[in-house]
Image (cartoon, helix red, strand yellow):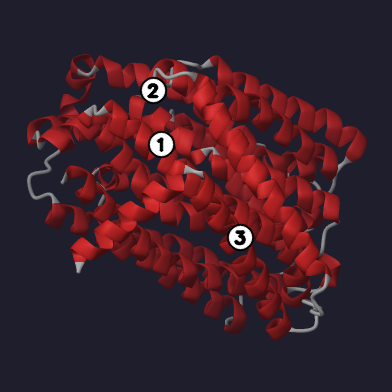
Amino acid sequence: MAAESRTAKSLKNSVVALGFYFVNLVLQFFSRKVFLDHLGAEVLGLNTTATNLLQFLNLAELGIGAAIACTLYKPLFDRDTAAINEIVSLQGWMYRRIAWVVIAGAAVLMCFFPWIFEKMPLPLWYAYASFGALLVSALLSYFVNYKQIVLSADQKEYRIQYSYKASMLAKTLCQIVAIKYFDDGYVWWLALEVGFAVVASAALNAVIRRTYPYLRTDLSAGKALSRKYPDVITKIKQLFFHKIGGFALTQTSPIIIYAYTSLTLVALYGNYMLIILGITSLMGAVFNSMNAGVGNLVAEGNKKRIMSVFEELFSVRFLLSCTVCFGVYMLTPAFITLWIGPEYVLDDLTLGLMVATLYIGLTRTTVEAYVNAYGLFSDIWAPVVEASINIGMSVLLGWFFGLHGILAGILLSLLIVVFCWKPYFLFRRGLKENLWIYVRMYAKHILLVSAVSAVMYLILGVLPFDPTAGIGAWLMYGIIVIVFFFSLLFGALYIATKGMKHIVSRMASTLNISK
């Protein structure tokens, strides 16, 4: 019954998240188009760079959220409300301290803006205003929104979607209107960024109070609670290093690109990254809600069930990851041409490197979900190596090969640490199973997708479609690419793998029960 409950909750979270995702996706693409048309690539590049700088300061978060979520799985499974209150109180106490560190760091960083944005052909106040507005939004997560971790760990993320994410959609819509129709559109954009952050925080906390009326935090007890829960502090220290690796992967590239080139190329890269991040968010909408279920499963301790679910999640995530990566590679150039113009299209090698990075980023999520559920954060050398390779090789190769070299540096770090080390670490320290189980499973999946890809290239070679002819032609071409590839790969995985058979059977059973 517990397994059925986990599956049902995951499906509910996924359906709600997908609905918000697609609405947000449409708004984001339209918003970026309006931004480029009315404010220009330089302002868009500035906004991207300011966001990256703020993410650097957010390294001070130290991974507290992930450590707290991992610690909450067991009390939530046992319905231990006293422990839940204590753990969330500890989180609030630590977040309050981190917030002041972020404020101090932001003040110091802004002193260097005249040098950081020396090449920017815009008034310097644009940089200060952009960074300040984004900073206020970020600080609310430390001072106000930290309790949402309980909703996430309890598989109730759909309630976050209904409150916080709905407010963010309204914000984006208002920003589009302001940029398009008002004078000083960027000033309105910044004001709405701050105003809706406050509104969204109030709505989210109202939902938390209704869902968990017993949740009472006492931040003054934080120091004593840190001694009561030493494992949380240990995990936070370990996660800090992992956050460095994550930051190096996601946030340093635009800064390095800007250092070697210009804000305009940052904006072009950002257009492609909007698509990549959109796909990543789509996968997150489908699968992030399952991560809390994995934590609940690990807390239950059924070893056979744990391995069975791992195979199921691996197969279904592999299916969707390969489908969207193939679709991104085949459809992105035509989409960029129709969306904002052919002058914004990057070369095929750049796209190929970005898709390879996307593939590893998507397929890593099964291993990561189990690593987080087991609290396996002790390999602090791994993110240090990943960040070192990522930044070092991006800077070195970027000097010789430009954007291609920067992206190759990212991919190299992922191959060494994420693709090779993380599965070994999970199977050795968490699952305590032979790694060859994973290697054989992965090899079988790779052989199947290679065969399907070869068939798809033969099919697409005889199609009479020109996807750049118009939005209708692009949609038709896209439907054929996605549906054919998905169907062929699904059929191959269902025939050849146990994981796909089991997940189909489980979902069919869950849907029948819900009826």
Q: Are marks 1 and 2 in contact (CB under 8 Å)?
A: yes
Gap in angstroms between the C-alphas marked 1 and 2: 10 Å
Gap in angstroms between the C-alphas marked 3 and 2: 31 Å
Amino acid type shown at disc 3 = Leu
| Residue 41 or residue 303, whichever sits in front | 303
Most extreme residue toward the front is 495
Q: Mark 2 points at which residue?
A: 431
Kindly identify the residue that appears in the image at 64 percent across and 19 percent down.
Answer: 385
Return the x and y of residue 164 as percentages of the image width and height.
Answer: 34, 60
Amino acid type shown at disc 2 = Leu
Kindly identify the residue that appears in the image at 78 percent across and 37 percent down.
Answer: 408
Amino acid type shown at disc 1 = Phe
* Rendered-image quadrant of the C terminus: bottom left
Return the x and y of residue 497 as percentages of the image width and height.
Answer: 49, 43
Q: Is residue 201 visible to us here?
A: no
Q: Is mark 3 on a helix, strand or loop?
A: helix
Q: In which quarter of the image is residue 294?
A: top left
- 10 Å crowding of disc 2: few (<14), some (14-19), many (20+): some
| Residue 136 or residue 253, whichever sits in front | 253
Number of on-image labels: 3
